[in-house]
Image (cartoon, helix red, strand yellow):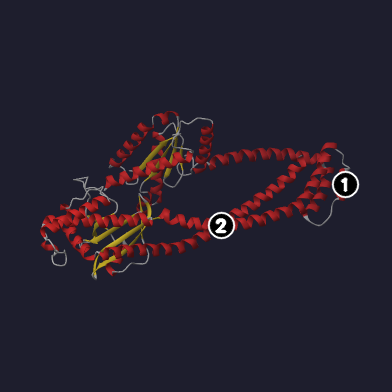
């Protein structure tokens, strides 16, 4: 049994070495493959967004005269046009019937744009026309967004004053402050060239640019593409399409992993064959030598040294080891003393390894536990679920504007913001383990006291964030902003710890959207 364990251990060590080689090879290959796939996929996505913009432009141009009349009217009378924020296709068709009925009553047998000019219509009919057209074109943009998997599609028109633009068609429906039940139309936003270089290039050149504008915001990182809209040879505005980086990267990672799988399979076959040869040609010799040493340890007969010398064949290191082992047996007493010293050193090494293992679970910047420690806690929760203990939850906290702080004030100030956010989390959730699981993201395992009082603790956390925001004596990076969401394990909804985390993450994301809406 001892002999087999030694042989197996040596073979296992070779396996670890080859495994490390495999991991390093896959990491290097993966990086190179990812960069190549990234270039290919970026060109594909650029072509995709161009096709979407061309599609929207063609559909709008098919109703070109109607769109031009609608745009001219809506820009001048946006406050007078009331469109329900939750309208659907049925409402749009009703709006169309309303306009057609009013027009037919006032201009029987006549056609708008042919024998009746838009300016000749009564204000009531003009308004009905604008409601119908806005609902029609906004639904068109929203359908394109959903069909092609984009996060945002919109149509903007420069105001002619500075870098302000009208958001004429905005697929993110928002209500008026004065009348929340109706759409906020033609909102004006400043698009500075430093952040919207490609947008202004598209407007000034009258052609779709090469490349994207990129944004880091509460939605994550997005790529924005722009294409000018022409009707009757006149440039009216810009069609904007935005793609989220997570979606952008998902396809790249999928292709990269597919290629890495093929590489890993080839390497595993080669490593398995190499391990077989090593075992047959070398480890079997070491195993025989181990058997002879074991026989000496049992019988204490130094004559075994002669038998060991007889097995010295070949000129490799194993043959050299065999001769040295034979000589070693004759001086065993001296080596036993060395063995005691070696044992003490190994004990010290184990203690150091244990200390290093503990450090490996700690985040160097904040002092709380890191992602590795969080994965260990997840394994504990899984076992707890199997044992029938289900009273736990997870809270997810995401620090806002970290990139803006790093870019504006420097990374040291960004680190201060991370530590302040971590300190606030630890202070509020004093009875729970806190983990830093990403650059600006933290997780809290809720049990016992904090599990029972989670709602009050979340309110306290948000209240203390609000107090920091109002504290004018603090520096900008000290007035931290963060979004928090939590979820408690529900056996009717959750079949794993991962599900609880995902629901907490979605709740945090919803809170982030609420905070954005409040700022606008």
Residue 260 tag number = 2
Q: Is residue 205 left or right of residue 274?
A: left
Q: Which residue is mark 1?
A: 307
Q: Which is nearer the eye, 384 or 83?
A: 83
Give me the residue at 30% from left, 42% from top. 469
- Rounded to the nearest whole Å, what is the CA distance between mark 1 and mark 2? 50 Å
* Callout 1: SS: helix
- Label 2 sits on a secondary structure element that is helix
| Quadrant of the frame with the N terminus | top right
Q: x, y percentage for residue 96? A: 21, 55
Q: Is residue 300 visible?
A: yes
Residue 12 percent coordinates (x, y):
69, 47
Above/below status of 276 relative to 6: below
Q: Which quadrant of the figure has residue 186?
A: bottom left
Is residue 420 something that shows in the picture?
no
Q: Any mark on residue 52, and which?
A: none
Label 1 vs 2, first from the N-terminus: 2
The x and y percentages for residue 378 are 51, 38
């Amino acid at each position: 049994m001892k002999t087999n364990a030694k042989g197996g251990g040596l073979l296992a060590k070779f396996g670890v070495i080859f495994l490390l080689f495999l991991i390093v090879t896959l990491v290097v290959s993966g990086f190179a493959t990812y960069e190549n796939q990234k270039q290919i996929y970026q060109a594909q996505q650029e072509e995709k967004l161009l096709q979407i913009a061309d599609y929207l432009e063609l559909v709008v141009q098919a109703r070109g005269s109607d769109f031009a009349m609608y745009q001219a009217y809506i820009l001048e009378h946006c406050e007078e046009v009331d469109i329900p924020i939750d309208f659907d296709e049925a409402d749009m068709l009703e709006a169309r019937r309303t306009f057609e009925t009013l027009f037919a009553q006032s201009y029987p047998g006549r056609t708008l744009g042919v024998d009746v000019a838009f300016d000749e219509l009564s204000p009531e009919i003009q308004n009905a026309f604008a409601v119908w057209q806005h609902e029609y074109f906004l639904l068109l943009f929203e359908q394109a967004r959903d069909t092609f998997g984009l996060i945002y599609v919109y149509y903007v028109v420069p105001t002619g004053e500075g870098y302000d633009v009208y958001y004429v068609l905005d697929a993110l429906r928002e209500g008026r402050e004065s009348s929340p039940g109706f759409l906020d139309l033609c909102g004006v936003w400043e698009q500075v060239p430093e952040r919207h270089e490609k947008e202004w290039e598209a407007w000034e050149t009258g052609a779709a640019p090469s490349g994207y504008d990129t944004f880091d915001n509460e939605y994550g990182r997005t790529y924005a593409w722009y294409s000018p809209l022409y009707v009757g040879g006149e440039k009216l505005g810009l069609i904007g399409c935005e793609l989220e980086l997570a979606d952008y990267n998902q396809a790249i990672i999928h292709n990269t992993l597919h290629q890495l799988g093929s590489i890993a399979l080839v390497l595993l076959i080669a490593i398995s064959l190499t391990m077989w040869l090593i075992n047959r040609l070398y480890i079997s010799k070491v195993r025989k030598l181990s058997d002879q040493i074991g026989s000496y340890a049992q019988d204490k007969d130094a004559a075994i040294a002669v038998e060991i010398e007889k097995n010295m064949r070949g000129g490799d290191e194993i043959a050299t080891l065999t001769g040295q082992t034979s000589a070693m047996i004759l001086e065993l007493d001296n080596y036993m003393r060395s063995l005691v010293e070696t044992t003490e050193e190994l004990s010290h090494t184990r203690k150091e390894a244990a200390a290093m293992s503990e450090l490996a679970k700690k985040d160097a910047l904040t002092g709380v536990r890191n992602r590795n420690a969080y994965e260990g806690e997840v394994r504990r929760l899984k076992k707890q679920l199997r044992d029938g203990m289900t009273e736990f939850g997870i809270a997810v906290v995401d620090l806002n504007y970290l990139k803006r702080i790093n870019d504006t004030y420097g990374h040291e100030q960004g680190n201060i913001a991370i530590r302040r956010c971590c300190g606030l989390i630890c202070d509020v959730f004093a009875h729970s383990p806190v983990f830093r699981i990403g650059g600006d993201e933290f997780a809290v395992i809720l049990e016992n006291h904090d599990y029972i009082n989670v709602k009050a603790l979340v309110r306290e956390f948000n209240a203390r964030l609000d107090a920091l925001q109002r504290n004018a004596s603090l520096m900008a990076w000290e007035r931290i902003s963060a979004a928090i969401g939590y979820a408690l394990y529900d056996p009717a909804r959750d079949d794993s710890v991962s599900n609880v985390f995902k629901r907490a993450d979605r709740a945090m994301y919803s809170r982030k959207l609420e905070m954005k809406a409040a700022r606008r």
